[in-house]
Image (tube, rainbow, N blue to C red):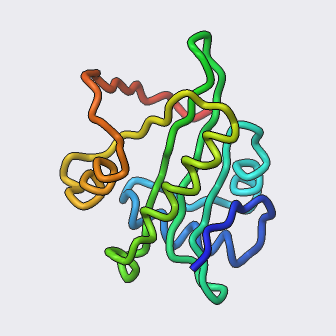
Amino acid sequence: MEIVESRDMTAGLLAAVNGLLPQLSTAARPLNAAELAALMQAEASRLFMAVEEGKYYGMLTLICFAAPTGRRARIEDLVVDAGARGKGVGRRLVHCALQAAERWGARAVELTSNPARIAANGLYRQMGFEPQPTNVYRLALPRG
């Protein structure tokens, strides 16, 4: 299995992303081709896909941004297909994202994870992520 940074929109990639999204969140809506293309072409985001023999097994988005306190990176929307879990796919996706963040010059990589996702939280700790004493706040905005 290889981890690739996807920069070109294809019908197969769109189908794979839309197949993985419901496994990530029941609230996630499918993307259309233009939305996926925009995500992959955005300067601040990198879409990594786990692929083997043309089949996709997982994805992760790395967001890179500059702040007054230094360059940062954030992992978002990491999901591994249910049939591929427990086989190191998530670890490989995170590892590739960490390498990309380091090349970009990020001083830290952050992520959030639902406490109920026991295996995912265990993976993050094994890879050196440490829980932070912070609150996460969210304000839903109306769609424009």
Left or right? Give the position of 34 relative to 1.
right
Seen as rendered, the residue at the extreme top is 68
Left or right? Give the position of 93 relative to 121.
right
Residue 16 spot, x, y in % from top left: 59, 74
Split into 4 quadrants, where in the image is the N terminus?
bottom right
Residue 40 spot, x, y in % from top left: 73, 52
> For residue 68, what is the image quadrant?
top right
Residue 8 spot, x, y in % from top left: 80, 63
Left or right? Give the position of 112 relative to 8.
left
Tally of numbered tags: 0
Which one is nearer the viewer's eye here, 104 or 84?
104
| Residue shown at 33% from the left, 50% from the top | 124
> For residue 50, what is the image quadrant?
bottom right
Which one is nearer the viewer's eye here, 7 or 90?
90
Left or right? Give the position of 99 relative to 75.
right
Seen as rendered, the residue at the extreme bottom is 53
| Residue shown at 67% from the left, 49% from the top | 46
Residue 64 spot, x, y in % from top left: 63, 35
> For residue 66, what is the image quadrant?
top right
| 83 up-or-down from 37: above or below | below
| Residue shown at 29% from the left, 27% from the top | 132
Which one is nearer the viewer's eye here, 100 or 74?
100
Split into 4 quadrants, where in the image is the C terminus?
top right
